[in-house]
Image: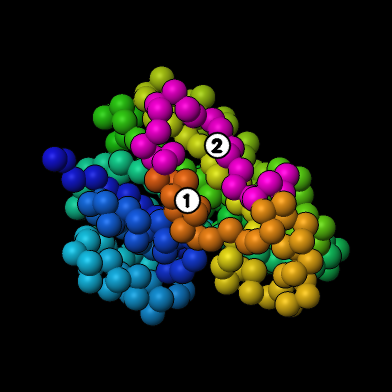
Amino acid sequence: MKKKYILVTGASRGIGRSIALLFASQGYHVFINCSRSMDALMETAREIQKTGGFCTPIPADIGKPDEVRSLFRQIYTITPQLDVLVNNAGIAHIGLLSDMSDEEWDRIINTNLSSVFYCCREAIPPMVHEKSGRIINISSMWGTTGASCEAAYSASKSGIHGLTRALAKELAPSNIQVNAIACGAIDTSMNSQLTEEERKTLEYEIPAGRFGTPEEVAALVWDMAHGPAYMTGQVIGIDGGYL
């Protein structure tokens, strides 16, 4: 059986790590990426290799186009095409918009949104040539509704929703599916800044009564990567009924 290849950005922890572990356990060669947390990324690699999986760690700041080009040059020395691209890397910023610096705004947009453009731009040509491929963008429910004191984050995720829908139409004739997942409150380090009281309040507001797990998001990514080819241009929520 032909080996399949996937790139998961932001794979050092949380959702990205769970996606990488799941796909590796099912025989994929996983390219795992992060920009700073190299110790955690290598721990993900060791976990994959310990169970007999295949992975290649590639550090890069995917908010920078030159580093993304370098990342894909390394990928294409191993395989001519990705079967699945998961744009997962993202950062948050909580604070009033009026207090944000230009640098903070640029960092959020570059990391969360421009990175998706840069990675898609490099991944698409071989997919088009083979008329095969899946692109899955990890987003947030705040990209749908917006969140107070998270304007930049919400804007970046809303941009992902628009990019997903437009790119899906562009690539559908080439049999490439592009979808997004709008995550609700997931139990990751991104939410670790919440106090115990804030966490309990948020859990009370979620009909499911709890945070989601990275493994649940990874399972949805797996389903979307292997689902019907006719499903494209969708933003699927996983938020415990919050929206």
Upstream in sequence: badge 2 or badge 1: 1
Q: Is residue 30 left or right of residue 235?
A: left
Q: Quadrant of residue 165?
A: top right
- Secondary structure under the numbered disc 1 in the rendered image: strand
Q: Position of residue 90 (x, y in %)?
A: 56, 60
| Cα distance between the residues tagged 2 and 1 | 11 Å
Q: Residue furthest left?
A: 1
Kind of element beneath mark 2: helix
Q: Is residue 208 above or below residue 92?
A: above
The scheme the figure's colours follow is rainbow
Which residue corresponds to the image point at 16% horizontal and 40% vertical from the top-left? Answer: 2
Position of residue 117 in the picture relative to residue 109 (left or right) = left
The answer to which of 235 and 198 lies nearer the viewer is: 198
What secondary structure is the stretch in magenta mostly built from? loop
Name the residue at 49% across, 54% down. Answer: 216
Q: Residues within 10 Å of mark 1 (few under 14, many from 20)?
A: many
* Bounds of the magenta segment: 223-243
Q: Residue at x 34, y 76 (%)?
A: 43
